[in-house]
Image (cartoon, helix red, strand yellow):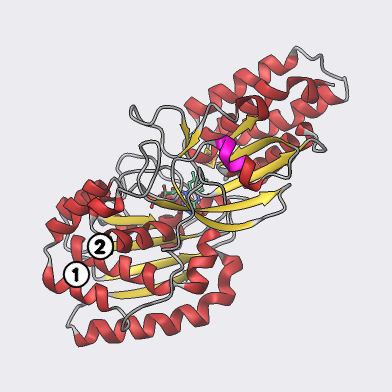
Amino acid sequence: MSTSIKRVDIIFAPYSEAPYQKFKEMITSVTPEFIVDELIASGLRGRGGAGFLTGLKWKYARNAEGDIKYVVSNADEGEPGTFKDREILTKVPRKMISGMGICAYVIGAKKGYIYLRAEYNYLKKDLQSELDIFHEVCREMNFDFNIEIFSGMGAYVCGEETALLNSIEGKRGEPRNKPPFPTNEGLFGKPTVINNVETFVNVMMVCRLGSEEYTKYGIHGQTGSKLFSISGDTPRGGVYELELGMKIRDLVNEFGDGNTKAIQVGGVSGFCVPRAKFDEYTIGFPSKLTGDSLPTGGSIKFFNSKRSMYHVLENFLEFFVEESCGQCTPCRVGTQQLLKGIREIKLKSMPPLYLNKLYDLAKTMKITSKCGLGQSVANAFCSIVDEFKEEIIY
Ligand SMILES: Cc1cc2nc3c(=O)[nH]c(=O)nc-3n(C[C@H](O)[C@H](O)[C@H](O)COP(=O)(O)O)c2cc1C
Ligand code: SF4
């Protein structure tokens, strides 16, 4: 591993103590306020993609009025090219469950759900055994919190937090309008914290290390480590825990096959970065401090010179057409028109200039679509068209 890519071995480190020891310690020795302050000080941002500050999210849910509150772990992991939550659920589920327990303590929840991607149902039995151990510990501590596994519905959009909540409620997995946000009106209308699997594990990291030590992980203004799912044209595909904030150039040097022409950061809903711009960006959460950082829930796809970027774009758009829930017009119709449009240009039944209209349509979808699915189509569409126009047209 090169020196500019910093490998970390915390998330998958084997359990080093009695089951749920740290969880017990936290809920008996520190106040919920202390935990919230530590999370805020750590700078921990959600690992599901959007990067909202976890401490702030928990604070909102804690302060929200409500006799009943919920904790939900988002284990839907539907973004193409992301397979890191599966590793956590397989190897160290206790760390995620501990994080959920601490969240329940902070916000005052008695019920939690793990929303498990339908394709991961084979993990259910082992997860349930781990939950049985956790529930026994809760009983011994007189801590009233129970977690249930809910099998996902096999749709990408159900990973969107409000669609996921609808799905648990037995409704169609369609995103809700926001606001209200789940921290105020979430599951069954009650205050809810919904976090990514890896976020809960990072909460445990902050609890163990303390916020000050935690912030020592990360480069170029980012804090903590992150799991990356590396796939595509790479000789080293797999899941890696790395410090956040590395330069894309360093990532390509480490994982590329020597012929990388572009990488897609953040899956189909993320951005395409061409070879000429590998030095311009770092990987992390954009902010005034960190500047040109690209966020990712974990997916990093490599494309080498043998790949047609037209086919990459066509493949992404086919995915969006299939996965749009159809609830709002810009996304339902827009995704279909973008796919139809690039095919017509390729077949020369539409002139190359038509691509400008499609580009405007993608940008319109960004500001008019109801949820992150439709809003993010422009990320991939515009970044691929900006950099590989010739390949799309000819
Ligand atoms: C279409 C779509 C799919 C999503 N899929 C996931 C997913 O599979 N897992 C996830 O953690 N977040 C996913 N998200 C993000 C969630 O809406 C939400 O931001 C996240 O679960 C919050 O957790 P975090 O703050 O810990 O990142 C998705 C968002 C969209 C718009
Ligand atoms: S943007 Fe797409 S996925 Fe989201 S609500 Fe609208 S149609 Fe459904």
Residue 348 location (% of width, % of height): 87, 20
Which residue, as the protein is rendered here, is positioned at the far front? 3
**Does 257 lie within the magenta span?**
no
The residue that label 2 is drawn on is 207
Residue 8 location (% of width, % of height): 45, 57
Residue type at tag 2: Cys
Q: Which residues are magenta?
A: 248-252
- Asked if disc 2 and disc 1 are in contact, CB closer than 8 Å, the reply is yes
Residue 78 location (% of width, % of height): 57, 54
Query: Gap between marks 2 and 1, in whole Å?
Result: 8 Å
Residue 388 location (% of width, % of height): 72, 24
Residue 299 sits above or below residue 340 on the image: below
The quarter of the picture where the C terminus appears is top right
Q: Is residue 184 visible?
A: no
Residue type at tag 1: Met
Q: Is residue 150 visible?
A: yes
Residue 166: name its quadrant: bottom left
SS state under label 2: helix
The residue that label 1 is drawn on is 26
Q: Is disc 1 surrounded by few (<14), some (14 to 19) or many (20+) residues within 10 Å?
A: some
Looking at this view, is 209 or 196 the one in front? 209
SS state under label 1: helix
